[in-house]
Image: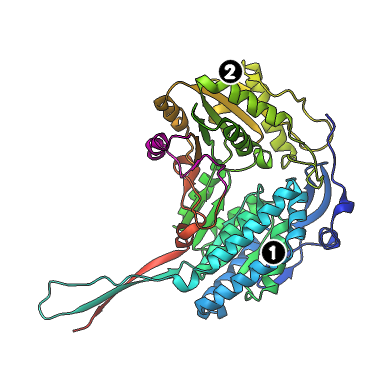
Amino acid sequence: MTISTNDYSRLGSATRAFIERSHGHFIDGQWLAAGSSLAVIDPANGQAFSAIAAGGAGEIDAAVRAAHHAFHHGSWSTLAPLAREALLIGLAERVERDAERLAELESLDNGMPLDFARINVFGAAGVLRYMAGWPSRICGETPEVRMPFPGSQFFGYTRREAVGVVGAIVPWNVPLMMAIWKLAPALAAGCTVVLKPAEDASLSALALAELVAQAGIPPGVVNIVTGLGREAGEALVKHPLVAKISFTGSTATGKRVNQLATETLKKVTLELGGKSPSLVFADANRAGAITGAANAIFTNSGQICVAGSRLYVERSCFEEVAEGVARHADNLHLGAGLDPASQLGPLINARQRDLVQGYIDRALASGATALTRRSQPEGDGYFVAPTVLVDVAQGDPLVQEEIFGPVLAVLPFDDQEEAIALANDSRYGLAACIWSESLSRVHQILPRLKCGKVSVNTAGFPYPALPEGGTRQSGFGRDLGREGLEGYLETKTVLIQAS
């Protein structure tokens, strides 16, 4: 199977100019030239097409100090809530205006199909608009205070205050969307931010920096430093002037982030890995469940934290559903992101491609059966064909470990209790999906699933007002929604003796 490569002539002139430009770090409202650089690789062909700056502790320190000054001494610290709202709306408008350029950069950098990139860009703008509504609504409480002191009266209340400088570290799978998931609530709360995008996909974050400046957000409020995680990322987590770290990425890296942050007792939000189950009962709409289960794992080539990578199907309809998902996978068009026909793009890099293919090969060697009929792609890109496997055991690594690729394990169950037990048999707890026409069944299952999000008869797409996050080794804290905003606020208690 030969795969298409990206046709760069399809790119808009603004995108071509951007990738040909020399990229530095965005610190204190200015572009700092790169001392050294990292190649930007097109996952569809394995070739370099641009470069980003390779920052380290020095650049991080400069960015954090700029953010610290903007928070404590700059205009940001005294800016009215409605003014923050207006700036966030202005940034959303510029993201929407430049949506095609941002989507093209995202597709080139990450490999995702261009149509999916467009959806993510407009979804990110929606998060900015949602969070823009919060600055004027942040408020404390005024409980009645009665102390047991004769003749004394007290007045008590609470204030909600921004935590300070936020270090935001985002992954490569949906880079722009993840960056805005961090930036929007932090800015709405009144924080300043140092963003470290993933070294494998930083271009859209750098384009976002230009829009931040155009929107009139003051210098130092948003700073972006590119570079390797072990250099720039660790320096950001350890910096003593950073008050909070918000990290999205793998569980292993999240544990390292949490350990480093503990040394200075920073607030931490971790949105980590997942091995999300989908449960299909015999009373489900079969066609909808098949399409939904396929989309849950094959969207963005499985490179989504909440990807439904474990599919449990009631035994009476197991063969129909498993075969249906496999045929759906066989009919998906695999190609470069800029190819208009592409429905699945490449994986992010050669390391990830080899990791995913290794899981498939080991499962097949251990007795698993592939229901999909496609051969693995040929060429220089980092492609893995969508794969549906049956005859796997619950304890197999294919079922227990996050693969982050287009690989689905399908297993049968006999009754509701077994389905719940299988779904919860994982160290992760990010998301789950239930397919059933019985509301009674759904409401019985919902409180028993150990995860942060459950979708019913639909894919688990995000919505700005609904929080996203997990339990157990999928992390703690939330992005999006009111809960996401509150992660960037501290509560201060005030007690006043009135008489």
In the image, residue 81 sits, relative to residue 322, either above or below, namely below
In the displayed orientation, state which residue is furthest to the top. 367
> Does label 1 or label 2 sit earlier along the sequence?
1
Q: Locate the C terminus by quadrant.
A: bottom left
Residue 123 is a magenta residue: no
- The answer to whether one can see residue 69 in this image is no
Tag 1's secondary structure? helix
Q: Amino acid at mark 1?
A: Glu
Q: Which residues are magenta?
A: 437-461
- On residue 7, the disc is none
Q: Amino acid at mark 2?
A: Asp
Residue holding disc 2: 391
State the residue position of label 1: 96
Q: Residue at x 16, y 72 (%)?
A: 147
What is the C-alpha distance between the residues marked 1 and 2? Answer: 46 Å
Which callout, 1 or 2, points to the residue nearer the camera?
1
Q: Position of residue 236 (x, y in %)?
A: 58, 58
Pinpoint residue 24: horizontal percent, then vertical percent: 75, 63
Q: Which of the image's four quarters has the N terminus?
A: top right
Q: Residues within 10 Å of mark 1 (few under 14, many from 20)?
A: some
Question: Would residue 202 be found to the left or right of residue 320 on screen?
Answer: right
Secondary structure under tag 2 reads loop
| Rendered residue at 10%/77% (across/down) | 150
Q: Position of residue 91 (x, y in %)?
A: 65, 69
